[in-house]
């Protein structure tokens, strides 16, 4: 090995290399240019199937399992290293680096062991964190082996990590924290905004202590779905000892032949859908990325086709406790609870099976139960988590790959698809594709999981699947559950008494039952979701007929707590009095103007001014 450079000379060379990169013109590979041009005319679609049905005999001999284990191990450690680095930067008051793909690629490279000598980390602060993290590893610890994996697998993994971090921190943090404040402290929207507006301010003026959120981490120890592109295929073949041409442009010329020799791609291609050179797999299931032509965009505003009279209209209200509640014009109701959906999708069976597996493996169960928390804002406590998990990381990863966790996950996916297909067939059983569904625009105000024990169902997946069977029109749900479908009066909540565990009797609001105070409805109580579905159905009919949305369901009109006024029958005497009063106002107005502008006597003017309030009251 060549002799090492002195520290000052090495730092000087690093600075020169960094400055040269700043002024160097960026270069774009030819395959990247071709992909950008292809994206303008085509779009991607995915077909999911089992890996065993997709692989040929030659692919089964490749070391895919070991590659998945090494990459998952590197992802786990890279997330831990990134969290530790952000904590140290916050504690020392330094600026947090840009959490993009190069940052996570550096983290993946830092925690891995390469077959050749790696270049040192350019960021000095990140280099200190890497040294601290590597010192926390056990003496006999075996790092992830990244030989032949850095160009393909690590590039895709770092992009996925950067996307997850951006969604967790930048995109979802503000609205999740706002919902948390509303739920935890019963604050309204303006109060939450006043407490959170300083988060995005350029200068913070408060004296409160600074609270920061950590980055996401790898979820559990199960194998993730990882993307394998052409470069990833090259690394996999190199791991398997296959003789290949040089990487880069030479291999890309023959890459399609290797794909088709190893995998049954022609089975999933059609005349319009062609293989895109990428797959995502966890070793059990595989997602095949195909390209298809983009649909032509209609010019101008999209108009709904006219009704022919053969359609069956449904109003569908999605929700949390009930996946959906829908009503048609004949009064027929259909519903599916979230509990029913997850039961038929084998989630309950899967969770029970996983619990039995953990109970039988005492070593794994002990490691999971005694593991320190990683949700902390102190680097010392986070290092305690690192010291605990690293000696057991290989055992946990191997256990979750050998046990049938991936198989259960794939079976749940199949059961979900079957249940969604059955629900769509039940909705369209009468007139088929002539069914028209007004689908409420699902907001899912608890996507962050603040409401514990109440998971939401796959509403958006149901909508996408339903569009394959019939026409689906997205409807605005504004006030559909608040206004009575019959008289449009604002409904009120019902309350019931409930005895608590301590023996005290408390009054609770019943969310699903609403009461109408209109005397014409005779104190009717309605189900919130059924009422919303009926309102959505009525709005769907109006929209399809080309009529405007009623003002009661528009956002610019405040709801009324009282029923609409009853029209008074015509009364000739009352109308005569109205005309006489209007005529008298006109006469007094004319007399007042003549007297003010014509009289020259001061006393008369003062008198008229003193009587002005009484006279002008008739105007």
Image (cartoon, helix red, strand yellow):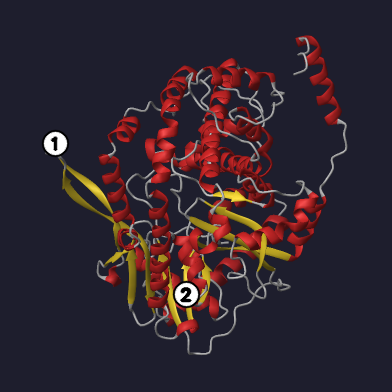
Query: Residue 101: x and y, percent?
Result: 66, 38
Query: Residue 494: x and y, percent?
Result: 26, 56
How many C-alpha atoms fall within 10 Å of the one at disc 1: few (<14), some, or many (≥20)?
Answer: few
Asked whether, in this view, residue 339 is left or right of residue 235, the answer is left
Residue at the (66%, 28%) spot, across then down: 97
**Which image quadrant is residue 316 in?**
bottom left
* Numbered badge on residue 581: none
Q: Does residue 488 appear in the picture of this structure?
A: no
The C terminus - image quarter: bottom right
Q: Does residue 402 appear in the picture of this structure?
A: yes
The N terminus - image quarter: top right
Residue at the (81%, 25%) spot, across then down: 18
Cα separation between marks 1 and 2: 47 Å
Residue at the (33%, 78%) spot, across then down: 332
Please state which of residues 491 and 404 is positioned toward the viewer in this rendering: 404
Please state which of residues 166 and 106 is positioned toward the viewer in this rendering: 106
How many C-alpha atoms fall within 10 Å of the one at disc 2: few (<14), some, or many (≥20)?
Answer: many
Please state which of residues 537 and 242 is positioned toward the viewer in this rendering: 242
Q: Are marks 1 and 2 in contact (CB under 8 Å)?
A: no
**Residue lying at the far bottom of the rendered structure:** 309
Name the mark nearer the viewer: 1 or 2: 2
Query: Residue 431: x and y, percent?
Result: 44, 86
**Which image quadrant is residue 556 in?**
bottom right
Give the residue pinned by disc 1.
Answer: 502
Give the residue pinned by disc 2.
Answer: 437
Q: Is residue 195 above or below residue 574?
A: above
**Which SS class for mark 1?**
loop
**Which SS class for mark 2?**
strand
Residue at the (39%, 66%) spot, across then down: 532
Please state which of residues 234 and 17 is positioned toward the viewer in this rendering: 234
Mark before the other along the chain sequence, 1 or 2: 2
């Amino acid at each position: 090995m060549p002799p090492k450079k002195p520290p000052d000379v090495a730092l000087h060379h690093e600075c020169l290399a960094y400055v040269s990169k700043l002024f160097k013109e960026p270069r774009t590979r030819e395959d990247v240019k071709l992909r950008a041009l292809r994206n303008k005319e085509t779009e991607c679609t995915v077909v999911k199937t089992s890996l065993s049905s997709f692989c040929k005999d030659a692919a089964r001999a490749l070391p895919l399992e070991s590659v998945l284990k090494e990459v998952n191990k590197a992802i786990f450690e890279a997330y831990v290293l990134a969290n530790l680095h952000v904590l140290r930067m916050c504690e020392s008051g330094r600026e947090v680096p840009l959490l993009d793909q190069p940052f996570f690629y550096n983290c993946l490279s830092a925690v891995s062991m390469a077959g050749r000598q790696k270049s040192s980390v350019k960021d000095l602060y990140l280099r200190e964190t890497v040294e601290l993290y590597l010192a926390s590893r056990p003496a006999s610890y075996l790092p992830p082996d990244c030989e032949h994996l850095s160009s393909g697998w690590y590039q895709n993994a770092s992009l996925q990590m950067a996307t997850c971090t951006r969604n967790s921190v930048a995109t979802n943090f503000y609205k999740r924290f706002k919902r948390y404040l509303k739920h935890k402290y019963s604050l309204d929207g303006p109060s939450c905004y006043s407490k959170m507006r300083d988060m995005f301010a350029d200068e913070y003026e408060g004296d409160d202590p600074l609270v920061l959120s950590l980055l996401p981490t790898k979820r559990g120890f199960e194998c993730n779905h990882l993307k394998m592109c052409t470069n990833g295929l090259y690394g996999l073949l190199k791991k398997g000892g296959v003789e290949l041409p040089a990487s880069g442009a030479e291999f890309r010329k023959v890459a399609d032949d290797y794909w088709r020799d190893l995998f049954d791609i022609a089975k999933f291609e059609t005349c319009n859908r062609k293989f895109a050179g990428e797959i995502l797999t966890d070793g059990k299931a595989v997602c095949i990325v195909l390209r298809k032509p983009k649909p032509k965009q209609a010019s101008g505003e999209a108009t709904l086709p006219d009704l022919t009279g053969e359609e069956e209209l449904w109003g569908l209200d999605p929700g949390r406790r009930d996946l959906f509640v829908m009503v048609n014009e004949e009064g027929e109701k259909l519903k599916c609870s979230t509990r029913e959906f997850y039961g038929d999708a084998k989630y309950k069976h899967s969770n029970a099976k996983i619990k039995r597996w953990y109970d039988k493996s005492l070593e794994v169960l002990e490691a999971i139960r005694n593991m320190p928390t990683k949700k902390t804002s102190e680097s010392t406590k986070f290092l305690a988590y690192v010291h605990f998990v690293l000696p057991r990381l290989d055992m946990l990863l191997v256990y979750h790959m050998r046990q049938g966790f991936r198989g259960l996950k794939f079976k749940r996916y199949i059961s979900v698809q079957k249940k969604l297909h059955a629900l769509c067939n039940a909705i369209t059983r009468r007139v088929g594709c002539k069914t028209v569904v007004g689908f409420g625009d699902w907001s899912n105000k608890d996507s962050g999981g603040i409401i514990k024990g109440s998971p939401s169902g796959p509403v958006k997946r149901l909508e996408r699947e339903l569009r394959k069977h019939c026409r689906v029109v997205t409807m605005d749900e504004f006030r559909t559950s608040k206004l009575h479908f019959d008289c449009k009066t604002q409904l009120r909540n019902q309350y019931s008494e409930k005895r608590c565990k301590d023996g005290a009797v408390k009054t609770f609001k019943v969310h699903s039952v609403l009461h109408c105070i209109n005397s014409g409805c005779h104190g009717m109580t309605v189900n919130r979701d059924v009422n919303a579905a009926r309102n959505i159905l009525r709005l769907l009919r109006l929209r399809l007929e080309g009529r405007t949305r009623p003002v009661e369901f528009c956002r610019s009109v405040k709801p009324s707590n009282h029923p609409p006024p009853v029209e008074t029958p015509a009364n000739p005497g009352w109308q005569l009095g109205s005309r006489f009063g209007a005529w008298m106002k006109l006469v007094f107005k004319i007399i007042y103007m003549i007297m003010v502008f014509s009289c020259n006597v001061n006393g008369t003017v003062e008198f008229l001014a003193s009587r002005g309030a009484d006279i002008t009251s008739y105007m």
